[in-house]
Amino acid sequence: MKAKITLLLTLFIGLNFGFAQQNEECITKLSIFHEYVKAKNYDAAYEPWMFVRETCPKFNNAIYVDGEKILDHKIDKATGAEKLAFINDLLKLYDQRAEYFASKTPIGEYGAKKSQLLYDNRKELNKTTEELYESFDAAYNADKATFQNPKSLYTYFSLMVDLYDAGKKPAQDLFNKYDDIVEKVEDEVNQYSEKLNKLAAKEDAGTALTKRESSYKRYYESYLKAYDQISGSIDSKLGDRANCENLVPLYQKDFEANKTNATWLKRAVSRMYYKECTDTPLYEQLVKAYDETAPSADTKYFVGTVLLKNGKENEAIGYFTESYDLESDTFKKAKLANRIGLILKKKGRYGQARTYFRNALALNPSNGRPHLSIAAMYAASANNCGDTTFNKRAVYWLAAEEARKAGRVDPTQKSNAAKSVANYTAKAPSKSDIFSAGNSGQSIRIGCWIGASVTVPSI
């Protein structure tokens, strides 16, 4: 009996020693490959990384974080069968990460990564459009919240368009997916804007951001720029497939079955409005049904657009005001204020428009577009709001000052803001004009609806 116990103890100690020795080797090699990855020497990192991956797959999530970088490098550098092997190994790595570190592997995020990898290498993998779309669709539906990558959202929608063009998806599926992706992008923009606004408020209060906060600020700005870019690309991809000739018969056919379906009505009205299909009797019919089914800030806005189309401008503005007052969501209220401002701007009601643009800025300071709209209204009023030739041209300084604000607060508008500033500055008085007027450094009061002062640059 003693002999058996002694044997068991010997085996136990031996096994523990073996595990400890193995564990120590994994620690050493993990440290080695991680340092190589930090130095971007991915080829040198490959061998020690593979040892740890195969020997201690549960040891540390760095195996999968660094492994993705290593295999991305290998895929970029390889060709033919070798490249295909690395692609398949990266797909396997994603599955292993989900197996060993499920809590650190969001289904939507990593499903999107896998799907994008399949799409980017579709020729090598011989994947069909249907297979690729099904991969994206499964990941999106499994975990929509973490399916956030802008590139993958665009690819997902692009595949739907390709299937529609091939006659494999009906128009309603295409439009539903468009609405779904656009709403998803808006949600993401909302979240990143809120985070960015908090940091901007801290800076505006005179408190410097920490190194970590500055890093987050750059991160939020980069994502907002990416979402802004894909928003335009998604609209371009949809193109004329959602023109009035296609939309009107589709909604006429489905109206009776959906005339009390608030979601269907909202999407139909929105699409008809943004595709400028508002001159048809169907648009008014849809708006009326939408307002009767689910009256809200949204429906009051669209009723206002119908009244405006019918020449009832004052009634329309009353509905826009009601819409704005009803909206409680900060981000939606900011968007609504900007939309109402644009309508009033187009009608030449600049004072009222500026009020809504400023409301939009107060609600969402990181959106620079209202600043550019205000600047454009100032510039358009230069001849009407100055009492002398110099003062008329001085309005352009005011416009340039407003345009600069857009570039400061909104990463997506830096280029547009810079062009506007250059344009307005070129139209403002020159140094020789200032010298002749003898008003260097003085304040000029701009009248009419603008009601603001601008300081003449010192020379």
Image: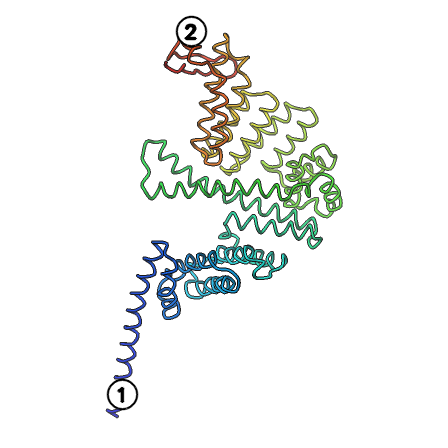
Residue 367, placed above or below residue 233: above
Q: Whole-Å distance between the Cαs marked 1 and 2?
A: 106 Å
Circle 1 SS class: helix
| Quadrant in which the C terminus is drawn | top left
**Residue at 56% across / 48% down in the picture?**
154
Circle 2 SS class: helix
Quadrant of the rendered image containing residue 2: bottom left
The residue that label 1 is drawn on is 7
Q: Give neighbour class at mark 2: few <14, some 14-19, many 20+ (Cα, 10 Å).
A: few
Question: What amino acid does circle 1 point to?
Answer: Leu
Residue 275, placed above or below residue 393: below
Q: Give neighbour class at mark 1: few <14, some 14-19, many 20+ (Cα, 10 Å).
A: few
Question: What amino acid does circle 2 point to?
Answer: Ser
Quadrant of the rendered image containing residue 127: bottom right
**Residue at 40% across / 38% down in the picture?**
198
The tag earlier along the polypeptide, 1 or 2, is 1
The residue that label 2 is drawn on is 436
Residue 59, percent from left and from top: 35, 66
| Frontmost residue, 80 versus 319 | 80
